[in-house]
Each structure stands twice: as C-alpha cells, then as structure tokens.
Image (cartoon, coloured by chain):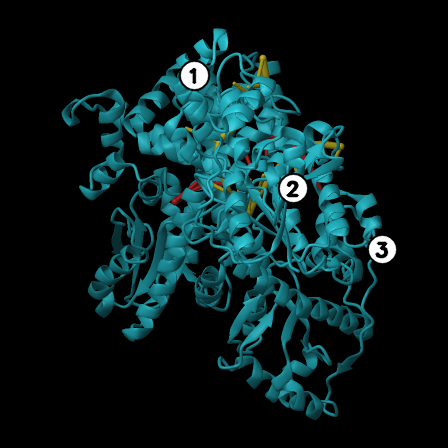
Chain colours: A cyan, B red, C yellow
Amino acid sequence: MEKLILIDGNSIIYRAFFAMPPLNNSSGLHTNAVYGFTNMLLRLIQDEKPTHIMVAFDAGKITFRHEGYEDYKGGREKTPPELSEQFPLTRELLESFGICWFELAGFEADDIIGTISRQAEEAGKEVLVVTGDKDMLQVVSDKVKVALTRKGISEVEPYGPQEIKDRYGLTPEQIIDLKGLMGDASDNIPGVPGIGEKTALKLLHQFGSVEEVLARTDELKGKMKENLVQHAEDARLSKQLATIHREVPIDRSFDDMIFHGLQEEKAAPVLRKLEFKSLLERLSFSEGAGASEAGDEGARKQDEVDVTVVDETALPELEKQLPKIEVMYVESHGDNPHQAEVMGLILSSLEHHFFVSNEFLLSEAAKPIKEWLADPQIPKCGYDLHRADLALHWQEILFAGAEHDIQLAAYLLDPTDNNQTISGLAAKYSLPSVPSDDEVYGKGAKFKVPDQETLSRHLARKALAMLRLIPLQKEELKKNEMNRLFYELEMPLSRILADMEKQGIAVNREALAELGKEFEAQIEKLETRIYELAGLEFNLNSPKQLGEVLFDKLGLPVVKKTKTGYSTDAEVLDKLAPYHEIVQFILEYRQLAKLQSTYVEGLLKEIRPDTGKVHTFYRQTIAATGRLSSQFPNLQNIPIRLEEGRKIRQVFVPSEEGWYILAADYSQIELRVLAHISDDKGLQEAFLHDMDIHTKTAMDVFGVTQEQVDADMRRSAKAVNFGIVYGISDYGLSQNLHITRKEAAHFIEQYFEAFQGVRRYMDEIVQEAKRDGYVTTLLERRRYLPEINASNFNLRSFAERTAMNTPIQGTAADIIKLAMVLMDETLRKHGLKSRMLLQVHDELVFEVPPEELETMSKLVPETMERALTLSVPLKAEVSSGTNWYEAK
DNA sequence: GCGTTCACG
DNA sequence: ACGTACGTGAACGCC
C-alpha cells in the first residue's frame, strides 16, 4: 500500500531549533534546526519507508484566520534571525533530497496538511502526519495517523483513533471542541477563562460539543457557568480558529510527492555545505568530496581522459564524429578577448575528445572545422562562447549558433557566485575534479602554455565537466522558470553584444590628443600653484602625502579618516575649501588628472591602430543585478556631468564619412519600474500623465502645489527618489542631502505616507527575501541574499536594501536587454545599415547613415518603449549629432 | 594585491 | 546600539 508522510515544516523546525544546542557551519550559518529536522526526516524514511513525502510550510503572511480575529498568533515572540535563516536552508535541503514541499499565501501548514491528508485518504492511501501541534489530531481517522513529537523532536508518539480515545476519551472531531473551550496560549486562541484541559474534557464527556455545552449552561452552576455564558462567543470563535481548513487549493499531485530515494550527487553537496559530517557518513556519502569553498579538492577524483590530437591524419575521424559533438571550448590567454591568444580548441562528446591546436585550426586543412564553427544551423554548447567568438573573430574565423553557454547559465542560476569557472562549477555540483587554470598554466608572470599533452588533457577534463553540467543546468533553469530568460533573452543578447564589440566605435585620435594638451597645460599650472601654496613639492597623486601636507603641515581640520590614514576624498575637500585656497586647486587638479589619465591616456591606449576604433568588451556575467559591465575600455563611464569631462564625448564619432551618432535613453526607467511592481497608484498616475517625477514627489512630500515647488524642494525630492530606488535609509539620505538623520527620517516618512504602495512593496519584498532567501525581477532573474536573516545588523541591513533595489535595477536591466534584442531584429527586418554600438544601462548608442537618420530617430525610441508592457508607459528620448557629445 | 579615489547609470 | 545609500571599472600609490 502507498504510504504518504506529511510533515508540518514550521512546527518541526521550531521545535528542533529550541531543542537542539546552537550549531553553525564554518561560514557562520546557523544549522541546528536544519540538523534536527534532517535527522528526524532520515529516521522517518528509514522506519516508515514511505512511498510519498511532502513538507508543508506556513507562507508567513496574513492567513484567512486573521480576517476574523486580529490577535490570532499575536502573542508570539518574533522569530529569532538565527532561526529564520534556517527556513530557506531547509527548503534547499528538501529540494536536494528530491522531496516535495509546498506553501500557499493565506494558509498555514495545518490547512495544507489537512487538505492533502483528506485527498490521500479518499485515494485509499495510508497517511502519517508529523507535527508538534496537538490541533492536528482532529484529522486522525482509520487511514490517517498523527505522530506528535515528544521531548523536543527526538521521539514521536503516533496517534490513531484508539490512542486519542485512550488518552482523552474523545473522537478526533472533538479535538476542535477541546481547543474551543481551553484555548491555546501559543496560538493566542482565547478559549474560556478558567477552563483548562481537565474541565474541558469533563464538559465534553458530558455534552459532546461546544455548541451543546453552550446550549445547556442551565445544567451547570457556579463560576464555570458564569464564564461560559459570558464568553460563549469566545468559545465559538476559538473553535472556529482551531478548525483546520481542508479545502485548500493545492497545485501538487500525488505524483509530485513520490519519494524516489536520496541521490548522492544532489543531496551530498547540500549536506556538505551545511557541514553535516555525521549524516554524510550515515548515508555513506563521501565526506570531503566537492566541498567547493573548503579547498579540500583532493578527495574528488579526476577523470582519466583519452584525447585525439587532430592533424591531417586524424581529421577524417573528427569529420565523421562532428555531428555527434556536444560541447566545444576555445581556450585563450589574456583578459581582453579582442587581444586574446588562442591556445586551442576542444570538441567533445561523451565518447570522444578532439583537441585542435590553434596552428592546425589556422591551417587550410582545418576548413571542415571552420565550416562547422561558422554554421548557425548547428547548435553549439560550451563555456564562454562570447569570448570564443571574439577570439576567433580576430583571427578571421567565423562563429555562430550558440545555444547553451554554461558560464551564462551559471550566472543566471547564481549571479553572485564568484567562482563560475568550469573547475568551480564542477566542485559545486560534486563532479569529478577539474584542476583550475592557474594550477595548470600558472598565474601572472608564471603563466606558461604547457606541452600539448598536458593542455589537451586539461581541456578534455573541462569538456567532460561541461557535458555533465549542461543537463544539471537545464533542469535547474527550468525549475527556476528561467528558460525564456536564458534562451530568448540572454543567449540571443550574447551574440548581439559580440557583434557590437566587433564593430567597435571610432575615436578621433587627433581631437583626443588635442584635448589632452589642453588638460596638460591646466594641470601644470595647478601643480605649480599647489606646490607654491604648500611650500613644498610632493606627489599630488598620493593621498598619503597629500594628507600629510593638508593636515600636518597646513593644520587643516581632519573631517574623516580611512583605515590607513586621513581621508582626502572630494567630500572632505569640499568641507575644507573655506579654510585654505589650496583646497579648491586640489579639487580642480584631481578632476583634470582623472580626465587625463583615465580618459585621454587610457582611451588613446585602447585605440586600435588598424581601425582607429575602440572595441569594448561587455561582460554579461558580472553584475549581481543583471546589468552589463564594460571593460577594455569601460565605455559605460565616459564623463557627462561636468562640462570639462563631457568634452571627451566629442571624440566618439561615426566610423563612416557623413554618418551620425544617435543616442536614445530611457526616461526614469527605474522609477517607472517601481511604479509597476509596487502598484502604487499615485506613482502610476504621475507617469500616465508624464509628469516631472521629482516635482511630483516634492508636491506630495511637502504637501504643496506644483507652483510652490522650488528648486531646493525638487532637489530634495530627487534625492529621496534615488534613495527609494537604492533601498532607503535615513542615514544614507542624511549624508546625501547634508541634513540630520531626523530630518531625513521625516522626509522618508512623508514619502511613504504619500506613496503607500511603495511602502507596502518595500515591506513585502523584504519579507519575501526572508522567506525565500532570494528576490527576483519581472523576468525571473534571481539574486540570493544569504545575509537577509543575519543577526549582524549591518549585514542584514545591507541585504534588506539589496532586496529592495535588485528587483528595480534588475528589471530595468531586463528591459533594456529586451530592447536590444528587439532592436537587432528590427534593424535586420528593415534592412537598415545603421549599427547598434553601445549600451550604457539606460541608453543605446548607434551610428546612422544620413538617409536613415529620420527613420531611426523614430524607430529606436519606439522599439525601446515597446520592449515590455508595464502598468505605466516606458519613455525613451532620442537625439543625434556628428559625435556622442552632440547627441545629447 | 589591496586601498583610495572617482568616472558612469 | 548598530553605522550605509544600489550597481560597476580604471588609475594610482604603496607594500
């Protein structure tokens, strides 16, 4: 017969937490409740041999019970953070055990269990409910037993109808009446004063039910009668509160609950992360293997590999196997993929590994391999295909057909994992060990291309790990509902980015050098003046030496210190300006020195002599929020705020005579996203009318009319809006606006009064993060926040602000990425010659031939605006000119 | 290789 | 009481 075990997750974890001594793993994670829970779970599996298991959780929000009685569970202490952080861990553990869990907003675990146990009973299954909550006894029947925990959780006591009768002299249904009369302090169920278990049982033995007791109070006497008459309503309400709801909508089938047994490859990594060594041993899983962080790699074996080195003799064999090749990997050396040296290519299936040296790849004989690489109809799986594409491109080898990039998938599955190398991923998934590149090649100055034997074997090990990683990633992407994000957004975008990077943007070298001369002249003047005023020459670029001059020699007041000494940043210098005229000159020097070193000299170094262009590299797997980042050079931080710096933009020009630079940027995209996800009616209204959002905020925060908003009020409101997007704190806002914390707190309160939907969103997203351990964007991009339940205030606060900010910044990133994919399609569809060149978070930059300028000026903003439909319109503004400066 | 500073959204 | 605004990359000094 089929046997289903239903576990009340919350109840067991609570009891385990208080029953177990404190326990944590080496990274400080509290694990005692998870440990107790796991122990009990394993014992149940061993003793009961269930065919099905399901764990129910409270969804942690307001339940239907609150609708009738506000104080329900009101008397409970707040859950300690050391316990809260263990809920996401428990869910992760259950998933690794292949055990189904369920929760539903508005219902408690009790109700879920009540419903499933009823359904299971109707389907003829045997059921065992495991909980610490006596209320649950009401669901007992011939088919349904309830195991109550005793002494913490180390023992359980099973109850069937007979056991309930022996213990209480009641039927299971009468348990509800019992609660109705005696109440339950821990659930804040009032019951009737003066009536405890003894009296309640006596009454029920005599009358049978709460209703009957209340109807026949005339048969009673004394204080008890008085209490019952006076609190009749409390008794009825208490009975209602204690009644388990058995018609919860549950979208899980019994098939979902089938327990297939533990699989080491899935369960072991989680147990290792928790450092449950005794459990690993008990399950006879190897203990040291696969601990990704602990550095005990040695315990995982390496694959033995057999590689065919492709030369003209071996080529026919490879050609025969090409249709079966499942993964490819291009090994290259150097951080900048536009200048990377290709070391070799590996093409693998589970049966074969073919190593192709770059020398052979570049030879005429390798034509079939090149045709395979270039064929967009042949889907390719691999690791960092974007980098491979660029490295191959610069040696005139075409690449197309990327389908599944392991690095990109790893990024979506955990964007904050900082070891998304093949070696790191192999460890994370407990696959056979792959030595790190640093181990094989040496790092920094020690880097050396190894002999072909070593290289090809290393690549074959990587390829094997890749072959195994792909199905695991596919499953996880599907489970996280990230298939569309991955296959329809990030993968297509990866090819588009590569195209933009290969195209590059032209830089007017002469104009840049000229600008450099102007800066240089000013810098020299400032240097002379500063040394004069200081009375000595020193290294102005050294904060240490500058600090000594300002604070020791000139005796200026110390405003702020760093870990290593005096702080001399711009904020400090601003405060010091009134004390000494040298300070203003230092600020100007700093500004120009930055422009000179980073933007003039830095950019000049990046211009390719052959093309006169700079080719940035967009990294798609770095930013935790889903944004892109840009390197070699970074074209996402070209100056704009100050006029001197903004001139740098003049040197970014079209690559063809007579063409234009066109730039379009989203207006207030983050606040529009916030209006959508918070469903704040006021904010939505403002955007529907396309109001100036900072003015609107000022009106609502200060309670004034549009005409009464002055520049200062608008400035404050703008800072508040920024703060809201960043996950506001009174301290942060006070720093930004140079006001007291109290004043900042007042602004924030005023803001939340005016925009209550935003307040609700901020509260709910933090709760969601605490419950799930992660937050998501509109397109299901995910960011884990392991510190959201930390007991350390700073860590927890940071995680809370991140929980508020990431869905906003991340959804904005989703949107512009969608726009880029759409834009690429649109350019093709219309057969336009215009080219997309740059992305700067909320801005896209194009070069456009004159005859397309008018078309593009409409098409680009239209495309950006239709990228995603929100409850408020998206707005994009476009402009163009003969260089990037003029396109403002 | 780390800390500080500063450029951008 | 705690002591920060969110996300990046590059240049420089210094050990």
Residue A841, x across and y down, in percent? 41, 49
* Residue at point 40%, 41% (across, down): A645
Q: Please identify, in this view, whether the residue under mark 2 or under mark 3 is nearer the observer.
A: 2
Q: Is residue A368 above or below residue A264?
A: below
Q: In percent of the image, x 40 and y 22: which residue is there?
A: A215
Residue indicated by mark 2: A160
The residue depicted at 59 percent of the width and 57 percent of the height is A410
Report how far apart the C-alphas of labels 2 and 1 lie in the structure: 32 Å
Check residue A298 in the rendering and tell me which mark sits there, or answer none.
Answer: 3
Work out whether residue A601 can be spotted.
Answer: no
Sequence-wise, the earlier of marks 2 and 1 is: 2
In the picture, measured across the screen, residue A816 lies left or right of residue A353, that is left
Tell me which numbered mark, 2 or 3, is placed earlier along the sequence: 2
Q: Chain of mark 1?
A: A
Chain letter for the residue marked with disc 3 in the picture = A
In the image, what residue type sits under mark 3? Gly
The kind of secondary structure element at disc 2 is: loop
Marks 2 and 3: CB-CB under 8 Å?
A: no
> Where residue A235 appears, x then y in whole percent?
44, 22
- Judge the density around disc 1: few (<14), some (14-19), many (≥20) Cα neighbours within 10 Å: some
At label 1, the amino acid type is Thr
